[in-house]
Amino acid sequence: MMGEIPPCNIRIDKEGNWYYKEAPIIREDIYLLFNQHIVKGSDGRYLLHIGNEKCYLEVEDTPFVIKRVSLRTDFKILLNDATQETLRLDTLRVGTDNILYCKVKNGKFDARFSRPSYYQFAEHIAYDEDEDRYFIPLDEKRYYLEWTYD
């Protein structure tokens, strides 16, 4: 059928690893190129869109995974696509199985914290007994964590 978008036969696991027909994509140049061309379709599914070619990706959780967190004057995150950005604390949320997420790429995508990055970040989480809530203190402001279960 004309105009139908096919599957890519590419799967992204919950750790941000890419597979083509279950074989790991290990060439860094290809992996980084593909990461630069992820778009979210109107149906909420992820597509690989390069030039005039489009295909659907199979994404286990999120296409972007936070690999490292560091604090200088603000929190910097390193993503699985080798890009760095400032963590938007106002987008933090805790999902099913207590997995921590935030928005990345100008708010276009969710990113999942990897276990190591979660532990790096967890050192900065505080508890507000009066509110019975957890928060991140930064610049004399409290950014409360929101629990959402999809």
Image: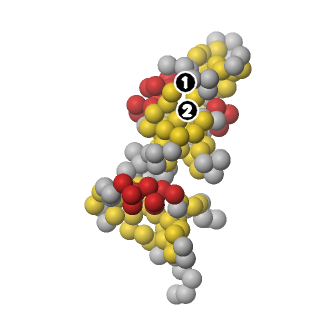
Numbered badge on residue 76: 2
Dot 2 amino acid type: Lys
Q: Which residue lies furthest to the right in this view?
A: 141
Q: Position of residue 100 (x, y in %)?
A: 52, 35
Q: Quadrant of the C terminus?
A: top right
Q: Quadrant of residue 51?
A: bottom right
Other residues around mark 1 within 10 Å, as few (<14) / some (14–19) / many (≥20): few
Front-lying residue, 105 or 116: 105
Q: Which residue lies furthest to the bottom in this view?
A: 1
Q: In this view, does 57 lie above or below 74?
A: below
Q: Mark 1 points at which residue?
A: 71
Q: Give SS at disc 1.
A: strand
Q: Is residue 145 above or below residue 105?
A: above
Q: Give SS at disc 2.
A: strand
Q: Where is residue 111 in the image (x, y as percent from the top left)?
A: 53, 44
Asked if the residue under mark 2 is in contact with the one under mark 1, i.e. CB atoms within 8 Å, the reply is yes
Real-space CA distance between mark 1 and mark 2, rounded to the nearest whole angstrom:
6 Å
Q: In which quarter of the image is residue 19?
A: bottom left
Numbered badge on residue 142: none
